[in-house]
Image (tube, rainbow, N blue to C red):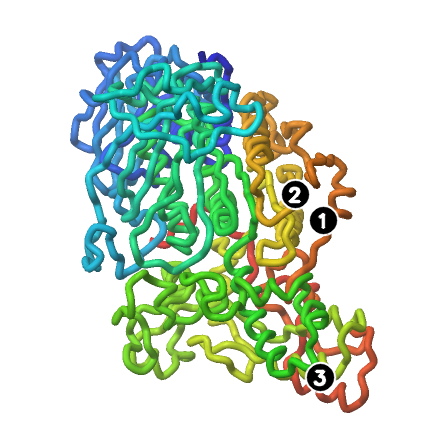
Amino acid sequence: MRTRALALVVAVVAVVGPAAMPFRAAAAAGGNLRVLVLSGKPAWVSGPEALVAVVVPTAADLGTVRVADGVRDVTSQLARGRLPALLHGVRVPQHIGLSPSSHALVGLVRLTPGTHTLRATLPSGRTSEAHITDYDDSGPMFAGPRVMPWFCIDKPSATNRPSCRVPTHYAYYYLPASSAGVGNHPSVGAPPSSDQFVSYNPQDPPSPDSVAHTTTDEGVRVPYIIRVETGIIDRDTYQIGVLATPGQAYTPWSSPVAWNHKVDVEIGGDCRPWHDQAKGLSVFDAHALGRGFAVVTGALDVLGNNCNPVVAAEALAMIKSRLVDEYGVIRYTIGEGCSGGSIILNAMTSNYPGLVDGALLMCSFPDIWQVVQQAEDCHLLDRVFDAHSGTWSTTKQDAVTGFLEPTTCRGFFDGAQGSVSTKVPDYAQSLLDPGRAASCTSQQDPAWVYDPSTNPGGVRCTLQDYQVAIWGHRPRSVWTAAERSAGAGFANRPFDNVGVQYGLAALNRHQISVAEFLSLNREVGGLSIDWNHTGARSVADPGALSVGYRTGQILDPHAQAAVPIIDLRGHDNEEIHLDIDSYVERARLKAATGGHRNQALWFELGEDAQDPTVTAQAFNQLDDWLANVESDRTGRTLAAEVAADRPATAGDQCWLAGLHILSWDQCRRMFAHGTDPRIAAGGPLQDNVMKCRLRRVTKSAYAATFSATQWEQLNAIFPSGVCDYSRPSVGASRSVTWHSFG
């Protein structure tokens, strides 16, 4: 039975508004009469209906309450007696004045896209209302104009279908009793493999003794059978998986008995400006499902299917709204993702707080534009290194880039064509080359892709053009010939390297000579808007920087203080998922919030984080952390509760050759890390300066000695000055949350 008193979902609601956030929507008017929207933030409701509770004074007769949507009477869509089941296992904050014994009507109110005012009226004339904005679940909602063209899976040639909608499909799967890892409580040992699930046919079910059982974290023991819903939301596929009984019908007030009202969101990696409908990750997370979680995935919540974290947040908001309307209110949501998945999670927890209440980051990055900066710096530096291979040994290259291995730049960041995969030969080209069709689509030689000569108005396969709803268009004053031919500006690009002294740290450590330092910075140059090398440095487009910081595209984690985070990383200094990024994120947290008590670093030996036992422990610790906050009744701020309620066993720690080490000082000594080209050029550990402010060159900034001629050369290379990293980036500001681009 679910007997534990639970509170986080609604406690968070009162501060930052997660998906069980509806309690925040209580109307102020009407005293004890209140209309609560339970499906999501009232300003961002999606789908054809919304879960609503109308709470009335105990002296009032529920049969005399009338509820209207404008002039439309919707009273018949609500009923008494549903609240106890709806709130089973969920604790509501006292100031809301709602409990399972409250006098209330509950129901799913049918809506059409647009604004609505739900008004409850008592016979005395007293009223209370809630204002809702409903959106079609094909989108868009807050992410702005949609990417076009968009190719549906079932009809790849239909470029302008608005929704790619297909009928929603339900299927059942079970874990065989013979599967490894079952029979124990899910918190003990490694979980069963997720590829062991087998299709379950309710019309011809397997024998009961061939089906495994699981005991949830609420002590409910059931056959290990899950219901998987597959459908289309926001033009792409999604899935919801949950322990269920075949043939049983569910409503928000009649939830699956084994569902613990918690959600695990599986978020995927990579980064591509993709124009094809795709598939999300599998919902068959045996560990989370076995504990009683509903597992949610969406194709748009895979950065390799959609390299736009704002769209990813919008899609998750819609999927969770559907889950609430089908199964009931949510206690809290855990998000887990590696690589590009961590970028999405950082964006959600910082820019759209409440969508995810706790984050399990793996092989993490702070944001995609830091990756762009690293990749393009590698591309520019490699060009110089290759032109003077006799001068630039791999040791000197590493000293300049800050990386510990040359494979970092030469692999994913700036590898040879096809060296990584057919889809992503290297991120430097894949993210900023507008004519690389393979970045955009699986179609062969699509005629709709940009070519500066033959198709200047075509689709540009760059990250910023894919995210043009965020960045806006370049002003006419900077248009190229191709833009003039197209009659429109391309998307603003925030990449900039004016004033960057590449190799500064190496020079001051005497790892490269003054002559090499000068030659490098003279030749490195920049990239045109069409990804061609230029002798001049790259200049960020007007307006791009302020947009990037204000909307959180450059991670500003001030809202993350209220989010428990475990950063689980496989020790890596060879490819791009580098240890330094965990410290970058911690430095940004400390700068934004004054501390990092909400973040725990867990390091393993080996690339990525692959030990299923350690991953399961991290998931369980995060779950316990959220449960502690959920039960916290001290009245502190959510951020203070998160800091105070971290389990003692969830602090910084590492694993090495089977040894579990709890001393973080010892972990840091064993897991050495490098930096990256901007930090090695004198930038801050936060690694969040997209365009530096400039200062004049001064000899005191260098540990090396310049001749008079060399000093003249330095001033000629940097006529406007060099980066002054003691000041914040040009355009930097605190980000705003729940920004709409529509």
The local secondary structure at tag 1 comes to loop
Residue farthest along the front direction in this orientation: 178
* Nearest-to-viewer mark from 3 and 1: 1
Query: On the image, numbered disc 1 is attached to which residue?
Result: 671
Give the crowd class for mark 3: few <14, some 14-19, many >=20 residues within 10 Å: many
Residue at (48% x, 22% y) in the render: 182
**Quadrant hosting residue 563:** top right
Residue farthest along the left direction in this orientation: 72
587 or 341: nearer the eye?
Answer: 341
Q: Which mark is residue 603?
A: 2
> Of label 2 and label 1, which has the lower sequence position?
2
Where's residue 467, x and y in %?
39, 60
Give the crowd class for mark 2: few <14, some 14-19, many >=20 residues within 10 Å: many
Where's residue 225, x and y in %?
35, 23
Type of the residue with mark 2: Phe
**What is the CA distance from the residue labelled 2 to the residue labelled 1?**
8 Å
Work out which quarter of the rendered image holds the N terminus and state it.
top left
The answer to whether mark 2 and mark 1 are in CB contact below 8 A is yes
Q: Which mark is residue 714?
A: 3
Where's residue 20, x and y in %?
41, 30
**What is the CA distance from the residue labelled 2 to the residue labelled 3?**
42 Å
